[in-house]
Image: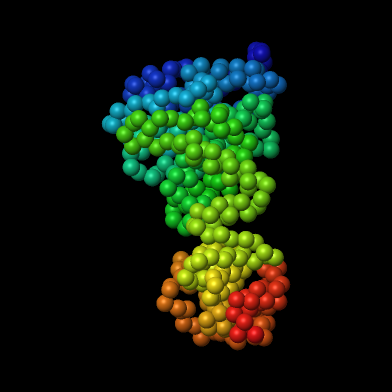
Amino acid sequence: METGTERPQPRLARHLAMAEVYADQTLSQRFASDLNHLLAEAKQTPRPPATTWDEWLGAVTRTLGPSLTDMLFPAGPVKAPVIPPHQRHLWRNRLRAMRDAVISEPQPWPELRMTVARLYLDLLAAGVWESGEEWRPELRDIVSTLPLRDDESGPGQLESYLSSLIAVCLALLCQEADLFGSAPNDAIAKSAWEKAAEIAAFADAEQAERYLYHPDQPYARVATRTDVDWVIELAVDSADDPHAELRAAFESAGLDVELIDGVWVSKGTFKNPRRAAARIATLIGDNCVTMAYNDKRASVIIRDGRDVVVADSVAPRWRYYKLTTLATPESLLGDAEGLPPTRENDPFRPVPERVAALFEAAGVNSQHILMLFDSFRPRLR
């Protein structure tokens, strides 16, 4: 309860119905102005403590009003708003300003960060960005702020809604993106995943479904239940297995890969094992040792930052390469015509000190991998 000596808690100046806000350009401008003012005030004001969900929700309702609170903590799926085409650019600009307010320090209260994320979901479903992709880095920035900080707490129901909202946001960002790809959309999705996937692991799919929309507006961007299930499942697997995301990337690439004594090994019917080993090294994107083989050939790749070493059973020598800024092991070694030329090479046996040092740095028993490698080409002994 507030007393005369307590500082009044920040609140929206007007508690407007969101359906009316979206329908009226004047009201939408007032709403955006009010919310930006609230975000600024909340940065300077501690959130009032609450011991129960009812207390916490009551405080949110007093701050945001019933309509926005219901949108933030939905009881069921909602319809996407209808935004007139001539107002779409206005909403894009408004949300960009709200994003800037949310990500700058000090950050506003958790429910206000969630509010801006929810507005992004609403307006993506309304097709406000049309065919543009500018929303991706903005939503990534918002998602990165959603996990509660060490000095923040809330009732269990808050964390349940929060994890579900994060799962839906990640599902949107992962559409038309590959968590282990190198395209701009891939990097954006990966960045958001690294910041928030740990929380998405606690999401409840049924509750997350309340944040989903039917794509009934032109240019609608919406997540599906399948998208959300995939995010939650991968987030849960990642919590139990640090390589779960990588295994998912291998599966998506059609590669059957096992981690054997520190070496990522793939056996398949592919015609070019070197290309498969290079693809694996590219997906890992870090220091690694990979080996791929079929019934006739085997290839080993060692990656240490930009240094790449490869040995192919067809031409059994260690060959050394340096990746350029934009190159990957796959772009360097994936050519079916053969290995690229290099002046730096050593005989396969005995293992040169340079290669032995790389094996040791990777925590790999070089004799073990050489035995595996040799078993596919007995003539190399």
Q: Spot the residue most to the left.
A: 86
Q: Residue at x 30, y 28 (%)?
A: 84
Q: Nearer the viewer, residue 234 or 153?
A: 234
Residue 190: % across, % down: 53, 50
Q: Spot the residue most to the front.
A: 295
Say how many tags the image has: 0
Q: In this view, does 109 lie above or below 292?
A: above
Q: Nearer the viewer, residue 64 or 366?
A: 366
Asked if one can make out residue 198 in the rendered structure from this viewpoint, the answer is no
Q: Residue at x 58, y 45 (%)?
A: 234
Residue 142: % across, % down: 51, 39
Query: Toward which corner of the image does residue 359 lie, by quadrant?
Result: bottom right
Q: In this view, does 21 lie above or below 109?
A: above
Q: Nearer the viewer, residue 368 or 156?
A: 368
Q: Is residue 287 above or below residue 1?
A: below
Query: Can you say which quadrant of the picture contains the C terminus?
Result: bottom right
Q: Which of 319 and 14 is in front in this view?
A: 319
Q: Which residue is drawn at 59% across and 69% down?
A: 291
Q: Is residue 358 above or below residue 145?
A: below
129 vs 354, left or right, is: left
Query: Can you say which quadrant of the picture contains the N terminus?
Result: top right
Q: Residue at x 56, y 70 (%)?
A: 293
Asked if one can make out residue 362 in the rendered structure from this viewpoint, the answer is yes
Query: Toward which corner of the image does residue 26 lie, by quadrant?
Result: top left
- Colour style of the rendered protein structure: rainbow
Residue 346: % across, % down: 59, 86
Residue 93: % across, % down: 38, 36
